Amino acid sequence: MHPRSMLFTLWGVFIRHFDSEIPLGAVLRLMSEFGFAGPAVRAAIGRLAEQGWVELRRDGRSSNLSMTAQGLEIVDEAANRIYRLRPEPWDGTWLLLTYTIPEEQRAARDQLRTDLAWWGFGTLGTGTWLSPHSLSPALAARLKSPEVAPYVDYFRATYTGPASNAALVLKGWRLEEVSGRYRQFLARFGPEFEAARADRLSERECFVRRCRLVHEYRKFLFVDPGLPEELLAADWPGGQAFDLFHAYDQLLAGPSAHFFYSVYAISSREKMAKGQLERSLQAALNPFGPATRIEPGLKYLKVINMAPPRLR
């Protein structure tokens, strides 16, 4: 686990709900819970600042850390995908994208490949990518950028053969590898979740566990394209892994959010107004609406009360 990566996790789970700015002292304190020393965290922040992801602002004798618009876009996109309850219904069409970026612009070409993989595209061959999803606003903006737009074309298309849509999926994505990683996630966090339900965990322990849980689950954003259920095998473990993730996340949410705020408030000169604090804590508890939207009867969600805890 790298400090830069954990900083993104902290931002996605907590900081973005608190005006997306946090005292540097609070960051150093929170990161120490994962074994990161101050110099390593400062060095990671320095590199992120050089890359345009974060900014440091002097506030008297202290400093506040905030994310740039570029960083917030990525964090919000990741959080939205992590907490998306179910894939959207599929209309049976594909988004087909091709590009012919010249060799002298290799850096732009490599970055586009990374971007397309992040957004869940599969590849059919050199310069040919496809996705069953609609074009997201963030990706649309990326494709309109000057270094990409002259070389990219994309279409909505229907696959007409000679094989099937399911066979097309096997060409475009390595789903066996993703399935294996989901099973590893279930084997690791399933027993931990069951034990946590019986334990009296401290707020600090809940904070550490929730961050580690999200940190591990968000790795699937880089390998799982989030295909519609119509294109997945009947024994696909991704849904079960999400059920476990969501149930465990909500079990830890209340105490972990209060621990975060206790550190945040100590380092902040001005505590948040009560109403704003309530809204921020509620968002950190349940980032994308009431968990009751999830259909009942799922293996992990039915074992705990999924209503957001009442704030005191």
Image (tube, grey):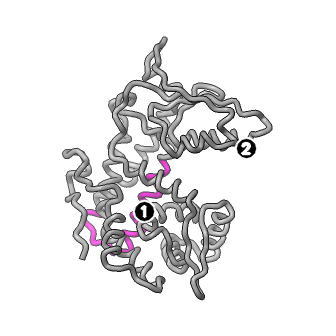
**Which residue type carries mark 1?**
Val
Quarter location, residue 239 = top left
Q: Is 288 located above or below residue 27 in the figure?
A: above
- Residue at image position (34%, 33%) is 89
Q: Is 263 located above or below residue 116 in the figure?
A: below
Residue 141 location (% of width, % of height): 56, 44
The residue at which mark 2 appears reads as: 107
* Residue at mark 1 to residue at mark 2: CA–CA distance: 31 Å
- Looking at the image, which is closer to me, 177 or 81? 81
- Residue at image position (46%, 44%) is 181
- Residue at image position (57%, 63%) is 68
* In the image: residue 58, left or right of residue 219: right
Boundaries of the magenta span: 196-220
Main SS of the magenta part reads helix
* In the image: residue 77, left or right of residue 230: right
Residue 77 location (% of width, % of height): 47, 51
The residue sitting at the top extreme is 162
Identify the mark nearer the N-term, 1 or 2.
1
Q: Crowdedness of circle 1 by 10 Å Cα count: few (<14), some, many (20+)?
A: many
Residue 97: in magenta span? no
Helix, strand or loop at mark 2: helix
Q: Give the quadrant of the C terminus.
A: bottom left
Residue 63 location (% of width, % of height): 58, 80
Quarter location, residue 61 = bottom right
Label drawn at residue 221: none
Residue 208: in magenta span? yes
Quarter location, residue 103 = top right
Q: Is 216 located above or below residue 211 in the figure?
A: above
Q: Crowdedness of circle 2 by 10 Å Cα count: few (<14), some, many (20+)?
A: few
The residue at which mark 1 appears reads as: 13
**Which residue type carries mark 2?**
Ala
Pointer 1 and pointer 2: residues touching (CB < 8 Å)?
no
